[in-house]
Image: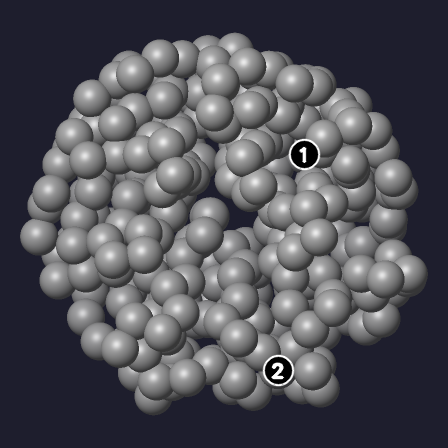
């Protein structure tokens, strides 16, 4: 389970805030104001974080105390965010203009833009790759992080929204329109499998040799064995689960309509408790920092 010092940075859209939670002590440490309906989140290794407020079209970089380090207003429909420490870039998807902004992670100055399919939402970084879930294009775009070149556009299910890289590099995308998950080889640009899950799958995370998928309309998490891709279990969580991430052997699920995060033991698949948040937790992205002390 989570250790003391493991932190969850939970964007709460309705509350215009971020709930900072110590997962070891299961206590909310503070609420940091984030105007403009925040949803997208990416946490840096130093405990600072990047949050996207969709209504105000604003990307902010703040430290864990809530001090503003940099800010950038973007002109389209910013939604998802991901950080690549190796290149010093932060990426933000533009829902309205089929692109990803590439920004300097320190200053948030624009670097370039990448073309995606229609309505890009979730972003994920791993192993020198950037992946974008292009919802209205029914595909995933994969880019090389070093060159920023487009490598593949991979057809997936209907309306992919959230996605994530498994520890072995396979890429999983939750398709909210077809109630399934597409498993891909992102380097080859091929589909490995399509797996049925619950109604309106949103986010995906990995722990203990398993994939965990939030099902918004089913108030549940689907569990998939990574070795066989077989279904393992369905776990009831809070109302309208969205963002999902892991800390050690704990899976953390943000329940948008319940103002909680649910904690799941990844080994036993038992619900280990819940922690209250500000209003409307979404936590869309990588929102956990392990071992921060």
The residues tagged by marks 2 and 1 sit, at their Cα atoms, a distance apart of 27 Å
**Residue 47: quarter of image:** bottom left
**Residue 228: quarter of image:** bottom right
Q: Secondary structure at mark 2?
A: strand
Vertical arrangement, residue 85 with respect to residue 288, above or below = above
Q: Residue at x 51, y 55 (%)?
A: 243
Give the quadrant of the C terminus.
bottom left
Task: Please tell me which of labels 2 and 1 falls first in the chain.
Answer: 1
Q: Which mark is residue 265?
A: 2
Q: Residue at x 45, y 52 (%)?
A: 286
| C-beta proximity under 8 Å, tags 2 and 1 | no
Vertical arrangement, residue 98 with respect to residue 95, above or below = above
Q: Residue at x 19, y 35 (%)?
A: 106
164 relative position to 100: left or right: right
89 relative position to 232: left or right: left
Residue 122 point in image, percent of width and height? 53, 37
Q: Residue at x 55, y 43 (%)?
A: 126
Which residue is disc 1 drawn over?
160
């Amino acid at each position: 389970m989570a250790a003391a010092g493991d932190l969850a940075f939970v964007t709460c859209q309705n509350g215009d805030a971020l709930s900072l939670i110590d997962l070891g002590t299961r206590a909310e440490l503070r609420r940091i104001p984030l105007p403009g309906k925040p949803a997208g989140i990416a946490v840096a290794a130093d405990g600072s974080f990047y949050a996207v407020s969709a209504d105000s079209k604003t990307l902010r970089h703040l430290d864990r105390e809530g001090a503003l380090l940099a800010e950038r207003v973007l002109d389209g429909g910013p939604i998802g965010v991901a950080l690549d420490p190796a290149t010093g870039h932060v990426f933000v998807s533009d829902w309205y203009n089929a692109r990803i902004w590439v920004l300097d992670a320190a200053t948030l100055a624009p670097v370039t833009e990448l073309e995606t399919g229609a309505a890009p939402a979730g972003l994920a970084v791993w192993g020198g790759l950037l992946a974008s879930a292009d919802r209205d294009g029914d595909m995933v775009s994969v880019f090389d992080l070093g060159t920023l070149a487009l490598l593949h556009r991979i057809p997936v299910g209907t309306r992919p929204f959230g996605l994530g890289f498994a520890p072995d590099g396979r890429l999983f995308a939750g398709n909210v329109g077809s109630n399934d998950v597409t498993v891909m080889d992102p380097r080859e640009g091929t589909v490995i499998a399509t797996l049925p899950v619950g109604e309106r799958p949103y986010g995906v995370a990995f722990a203990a040799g398993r994939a965990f998928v939030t099902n918004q309309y089913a108030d549940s998490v689907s569990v998939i064995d990574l070795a066989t891709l077989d279904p393992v279990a369905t776990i009831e969580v809070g109302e309208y689960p969205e963002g999902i991430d892991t800390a050690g052997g704990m899976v953390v699920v943000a329940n948008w309509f319940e103002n909680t995060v649910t904690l799941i033991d990844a080994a036993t698949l038992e619900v280990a408790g819940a922690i209250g948040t500000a209003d409307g937790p979404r936590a869309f992205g990588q929102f956990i920092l392990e071992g921060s002390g």
